[in-house]
Image: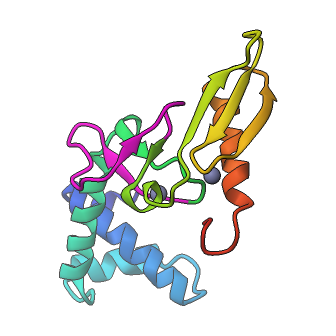
């Protein structure tokens, strides 16, 4: 990092970085960073307030510990919530096999579960729509969810993802 911005508050350094990424995305001029820093420091940078507010948002999001995020298990879904604050909206459901579904996907009528094979050597994964798997080995959550994700992927357009 340039010595010229090392003394700036973190939020301003992040803002310069975001602005720099934005500018480089729009032009092919190499080494724009010194030029950007020059403009930032002499106050001629456009939309300085905008980039500072973007930087504040980025820093706020960075406070979220990724290990505390809980994701919808429907493949392709990016819905999540922070376990320390909870989902904030009702309708999230955790199903047998530990699958977690967001309100939208919980409403699709495909909830994974499992039972043990009579000889206790394998699991039979099942979906609440009636689909059942062949005996699954290894006997763990991952195998059940992998079968279920494959089942979801084969649903007709619109019913699946
Ligand atoms: Zn979802
Ligand atoms: Zn199903």
Give the residue at x 61% y 29%. 114
Residue at 25% over, 53% down: 90
Let me know if residue 89 is in the magenta part.
yes
Dominant secondary structure, magenta: loop
Q: Establish if 87 lies above or below 159.
A: above
Task: Say whether residue 156 is left or right of residue 95.
Answer: right
Tell me which residue sits at (57%, 86%) in the image: 29
Can the viewer see residue 6?
no
Taking depth in this image into account, of 104 and 3 the one nearest to the observer is 104
Left or right of 46? Residue 142 is: right
- Seen at 62% across and 65% down, the residue is 160
Q: Position of residue 5 (x, y in %)?
A: 29, 62
**Vertical placement of residue 121 versus 30, above or below:** above
Q: Which residues are magenta?
A: 77-99
Q: Is residue 29 left or right of residue 65?
A: right
Location of the N terminus by quadrant is: bottom left
Q: How is the image coloured?
A: rainbow
> Taking the image as drawn, is residue 39 in sight?
yes
- Image position, residue 40 (x, y; %): 27, 78
Count of numbered tags: 0
Q: Where does the image place residue 74, in percent across and percent down from the top left?
A: 55, 53
Provide residue 32's location: percent of width, then percent of height: 48, 79
**Against 70, is 10 above or below?**
below
Let me know if residue 103 is in the magenta part. Answer: no
The residue nearer to you, when weighing 45 against 56, is 56
């Amino acid at each position: 990092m340039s010595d010229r911005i090392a003394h700036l508050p973190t939020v301003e350094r992040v803002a310069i970085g975001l602005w720099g990424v934005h500018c480089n995305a729009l032009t092919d001029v190499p080494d724009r960073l010194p030029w950007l820093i020059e403009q930032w420091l002499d106050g001629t940078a456009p939309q300085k307030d905008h980039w500072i507010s973007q930087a504040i948002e980025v820093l706020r999001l960075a406070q979220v510990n990724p290990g505390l995020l809980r994701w919808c298990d429907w493949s392709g879904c990016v819905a999540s919530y922070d376990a320390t604050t909870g989902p904030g909206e009702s309708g999230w459901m955790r199903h047998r096999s530990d699958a977690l579904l967001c309100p939208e996907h919980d409403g699709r009528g495909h909830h994974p579960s499992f039972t043990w094979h009579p000889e206790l050597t394998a699991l039979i994964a099942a979906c609440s729509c009636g689909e059942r798997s062949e005996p699954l080995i290894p006997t763990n959550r991952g195998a059940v969810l992998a079968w279920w994700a494959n089942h979801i992927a084969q649903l007709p357009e619109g019913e699946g993802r």
